[in-house]
Every structure is written in structure tokens, then in C-alpha cells.
């Protein structure tokens, strides 16, 4: 019987990798119902539920694993992460406390706990973090976690100079261990603009009746998760999170058209401009429904993968009725918010201020191209205006998306849908303005970034 239970988990993994969400869910449900007193099996089940986006089911399995084996730090760590996803922030912090009491050397848990709330002079972990930072680290990754945690807590209590020193040290160390070529990403912007000129995009200018997807794009840490939560609080909309479905559907079509995989970036972009984009749109909707099982529960859904800004022209041809919302923020505030975030994956440009400024300029250039080539197609929502006038900005957002006004959209912090992004804890709070001008505490330290933006013709505060 034990063997049969583990076989069901293996079947679930295989079905999930094959894209058969329903079969994976069914196998996992069977394994869960029969796991009984096997803590390790409950842990494995919870991990796969989470990968499938079924975070409430994952939390139930992770909780059972902790009940059966409360002295295993990894089980507590996973449960704390899931509690954060579903918005049970106080429980998440208490669970991280338990995990760290058992394993003080889990440096990632220190950072995760720090990010759950705003630290105060009376209640923080600065002394303990400083003690950890003073000791030798066994791996650079562990030092990065502690430097970022210290930077966050020192900023929260107003020790800004010390905070930036820790942040800079952590970011520099992180960048040193990333293999990344910024020039390739900047070249990609040129390739996209050349492959999709305004003349090619003229046909998509006319407004279309709203279709199911609403894409929320922009730089990370600019408010994209907040906008997703606002939209997802509408009774007709489901917030599906950061789906990889469009780039996956596009890559699949490109490789099928080219007759091979392993294409260069230049070949990828050139081929993407001539694939059957309506077929890409159909494939995208199928992939989205598989990736987020709840997509089909409401008439509309939000896909808030920030990097979909690269594909705006293709999205509008593949899905003419899709709505694209571009979230923008003061350039200095936007760049500082990225710089102080430790991303688990992606955004390798964000750990060096000069690279960050150059990447931001490339992103801005591409968005200017989409705006010029497809006037009226992309709705631009400014984060600062949303904070200042939430009702007016939300009304304009809903109108653009073809949605009737719903008062609950202003109560986005009460939205029970799980969130797995870096903003998962912040979006459980009502709108706050404390982060709007926070970057100005570091004008001296951020002077090189400001100079880089100006060199590209970007108003740093515009």
C-alpha cells in the first residue's frame, strides 16, 4: 500500500510534466487521501500541489507533514511559505520562528521572515542578523540572504545609510555569481522593433470587443501584483498570477515554423514575426487553462507576467480582444525597488545600478515603440496616481477592460486568492504611500543611476 501511494505521486508528476493538469490533480488527490501517517509523502504531495498552483491544498498537505514530524525544519519552512502565499502572515512568521529555532543556519528563512512585515525599533531581528553577518559564510548565497535581510530591517527602522551599505554589498555579491550579458537583452529590443515596425502593427489599432485575457505588464516591483489583485477582486475576473503560457506558446510556434529547436535569438525574433499568431493565441488559452486550473471559473483572467511587455505587438495580433495594462512608476522609484529586491530567478540586470539604468532605458524604448505603433491599445496606469486617487484610477482601469464598476476592487487586500510574487505580503494591506518617495532617502547613493537615466534622455522623476 505504501508503494501504491508513492506511485500515485509519480503519476501526478508525469501527468503534470505532460501538461495534463486534470490527471495530475486526480492522482495527487488519491495519494493525499491515502497518505495517512507518512510525513515525507505529505511533504512531497504539498510540493507538487504548490507547483500546480493549488496552494490551499498544498498548505493542507504541508500542515499534515508538520503535525507528523514537527522537528523537521524543511517541513516548517515550506508551510511558512504557503501561509504567506494564502495571506496568513502572522502564522507564517510564527512558523518561520519555529523553523529557525531548529535550524538557525537557514539563511533564506531569515530573509523570508523579514519580508513578511515592516520591522519596528521595538520588534526586529537586527542584532541577530548582525551577529550572523559577522561570521564566515559557507556559501556566497547565504551571505546574500543575510545582507538583504539586514538592508530591509535597517531601512524599516530608519537607519538608511547602514541599510544601503548592506544592500550594495549583497547586490554586488549576487551579481558576481550571475552569468549575464546585458548587451544581448538590449540587442533584443532592437530586433523586436525592427521585426515589428509600426506599419506591421497598423492593423491592430482598432478597438476590439474584450476577450478573456487581461495582460498586466511592466517592470517588476512597480505595482503589477497590486493591479492584478484589484482586477482579481472583480467577480468576473480571476487573478492567474505570472503565467509563462504566452512565451511558451510563442516559442513552440517558432520552433514548429522553423522546423527545429536551438534557434539563435535573432532567428527566434525573425521567425516570431511570421508565425500563425491566431494559432499562438489559441495555444496560449489552452496552456493558461492548464497552468492555472481556476482560469476557467470566471469569464476573464489576469496574466501578470511583467516580461510580457516584450510581446505586446504579438499579443495583440494573437488575441485581438485581449487587454494590455502597462503599470509604470517614477523611474528612480522603480529602479530602486528592483535594486533592493532579491529575485529568486530572473531579472539579472537588477543587481548593478549602471546595468539597471541601461536595461530600464531599453525597456522604456520598447514600450514607447508599442505606444506609438498601436495607439490606444495599451492602457498606461501610473502607480503614484493609483495610490493618490484609487477610485478614479480603478474606474478607468475597469472601463478599459470592459468591466462594470465593482466596489470590491477597492478592497483588494481582502482578496483570498493566493499570491506567490515578491509582493505577496504587501498586497494583503490596504493602499499605502510610504514607498512612493522612499528612494529619495538614497539620492546620494543612487546618483550614478540618476546620471545614467539622464544620459538616455529619461527624466528620473518623470
Image (cartoon, rainbow, N blue to C red):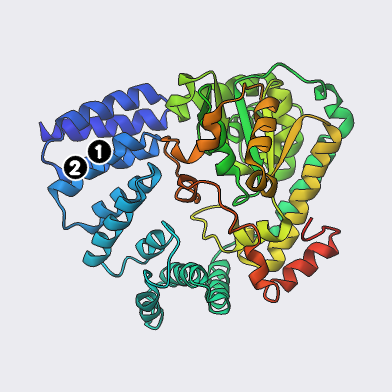
Quadrant of residue 12 within the rendered picture: top left
Q: Which residue is identified by label 1?
A: 60
Q: Are marks 1 and 2 in contact (CB under 8 Å)?
A: yes
Q: Residue at x 79, y 62 (%)?
A: 453
Quadrant of residue 417 within the rendered picture: top left
Q: How many marks?
A: 2
Q: Position of residue 194 (x, y in %)?
A: 84, 40
Q: Residue furthest right?
A: 199
Q: Position of residue 401 (x, y in %)?
A: 66, 26
- In the image: residue 274, left or right of residue 48: right
Along the viewing direction, whichever of 254 and 92 lies nearer the viewer? 92
- Spatial distance from mark 1 to mark 2, Cα to Cα? 6 Å
Q: Residues within 10 Å of mark 1 (few under 14, many from 20)?
A: some
The C terminus is located in which quarter? Answer: bottom right
The N terminus is located in which quarter? Answer: top left
Q: Residue at x 48, y 55 (%)?
A: 344
SS of the residue under disc 2: helix
Q: Residue at x 64, y 71 (%)?
A: 441
Along the viewing direction, whichever of 331 and 33 lies nearer the viewer? 331
Q: Position of residue 152 (x, y in %)?
A: 49, 67
Above or below: residue 134 compared with residue 200: below
Q: Is residue 153 visible?
A: yes
Numbered circle sitting on residue 41:
none
- In the image: residue 11, left or right of residue 148: left
- In the image: residue 105, left or right of residue 257: left
SS of the residue under disc 1: helix
Quadrant of residue 301 within the rendered picture: top right
Numbered circle sitting on residue 64:
2
Q: Position of residue 280 (x, y in %)?
A: 64, 24
Amino acid at each position: 500500500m505504501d508503494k501504491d501511494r508513492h506511485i500515485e505521486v509519480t503519476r501526478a508528476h508525469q501527468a503534470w510534466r505532460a501538461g495534463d493538469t486534470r490527471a495530475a490533480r486526480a492522482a495527487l488527490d488519491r495519494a493525499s487521501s491515502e497518505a495517512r501517517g507518512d510525513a515525507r509523502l505529505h511533504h512531497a504531495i504539498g510540493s507538487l500541489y504548490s507547483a500546480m498552483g493549488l496552494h490551499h491544498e498544498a498548505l493542507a498537505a504541508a500542515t499534515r507533514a508538520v503535525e507528523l514530524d514537527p522537528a523537521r525544519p524543511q517541513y516548517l519552512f515550506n508551510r511558512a511559505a504557503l501561509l504567506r502565499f494564502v495571506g496568513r502572515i502572522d502564522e507564517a512568521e510564527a512558523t518561520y520562528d519555529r523553523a529557525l529555532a531548529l535550524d538557525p543556519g537557514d539563511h533564506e528563512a531569515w530573509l523570508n521572515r523579514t519580508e513578511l512585515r515592516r520591522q519596528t525599533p521595538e520588534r526586529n531581528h537586527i542584532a541577530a542578523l548582525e551577529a550572523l553577518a559577522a561570521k564566515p559564510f559557507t556559501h556566497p548565497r547565504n551571505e546574500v540572504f543575510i545582507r538583504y535581510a539586514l538592508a530591509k530591517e535597517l531601512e524599516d527602522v530608519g537607519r538608511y545609510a547602514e541599510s544601503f551599505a548592506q544592500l550594495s554589498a549583497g547586490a554586488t555579491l549576487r551579481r558576481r555569481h550571475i552569468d549575464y550579458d546585458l548587451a544581448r537583452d538590449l540587442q533584443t529590443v532592437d530586433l523586436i522593433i525592427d521585426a515589428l515596425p509600426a506599419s506591421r502593427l497598423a492593423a491592430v489599432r482598432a478597438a476590439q470587443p474584450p476577450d478573456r485575457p487581461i495582460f498586466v505588464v511592466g517592470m517588476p516591483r512597480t505595482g503589477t501584483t497590486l493591479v492584478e489583485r484589484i482586477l482579481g477582486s472583480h467577480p468576473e475576473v480571476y487573478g492567474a498570477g505570472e503565467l509563462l503560457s504566452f512565451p511558451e506558446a510563442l516559442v513552440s510556434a517558432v520552433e514548429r515554423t522553423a522546423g527545429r529547436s536551438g534557434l539563435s535569438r535573432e532567428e527566434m525574433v525573425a521567425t516570431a514575426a511570421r508565425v500563425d499568431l491566431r494559432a499562438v493565441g489559441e495555444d496560449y488559452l489552452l496552456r493558461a487553462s492548464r497552468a492555472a486550473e481556476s482560469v476557467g471559473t470566471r469569464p476573464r483572467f489576469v496574466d501578470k507576467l511583467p516580461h510580457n511587455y516584450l510581446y505586446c505587438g504579438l499579443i495583440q495580433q494573437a488575441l485581438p480582444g485581449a487587454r494590455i495594462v502597462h503599470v509604470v512608476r517614477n523611474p528612480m522609484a522603480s529602479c530602486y525597488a528592483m535594486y533592493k529586491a532579491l529575485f529568486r530567478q530572473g531579472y539579472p540586470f537588477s543587481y548593478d545600478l549602471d546595468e539597471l539604468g541601461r536595461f530600464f532605458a531599453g525597456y522604456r524604448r520598447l514600450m514607447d515603440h508599442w505606444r506609438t505603433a498601436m495607439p490606444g491599445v495599451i492602457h498606461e496606469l501610473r502607480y503614484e496616481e493609483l495610490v493618490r486617487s484609487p477610485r478614479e484610477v480603478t474606474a478607468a482601469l475597469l472601463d478599459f477592460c470592459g468591466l462594470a464598476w465593482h466596489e470590491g476592487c477597492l478592497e483588494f487586500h481582502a482578496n483570498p486568492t493566493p499570491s506567490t510574487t515578491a509582493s505577496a505580503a504587501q498586497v494583503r494591506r490596504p493602499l499605502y504611500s510610504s514607498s512612493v518617495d522612499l528612494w529619495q532617502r538614497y539620492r546620494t547613493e543612487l546618483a550614478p543611476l540618476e546620471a545614467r537615466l539622464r544620459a538616455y534622455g529619461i527624466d528620473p522623476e518623470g
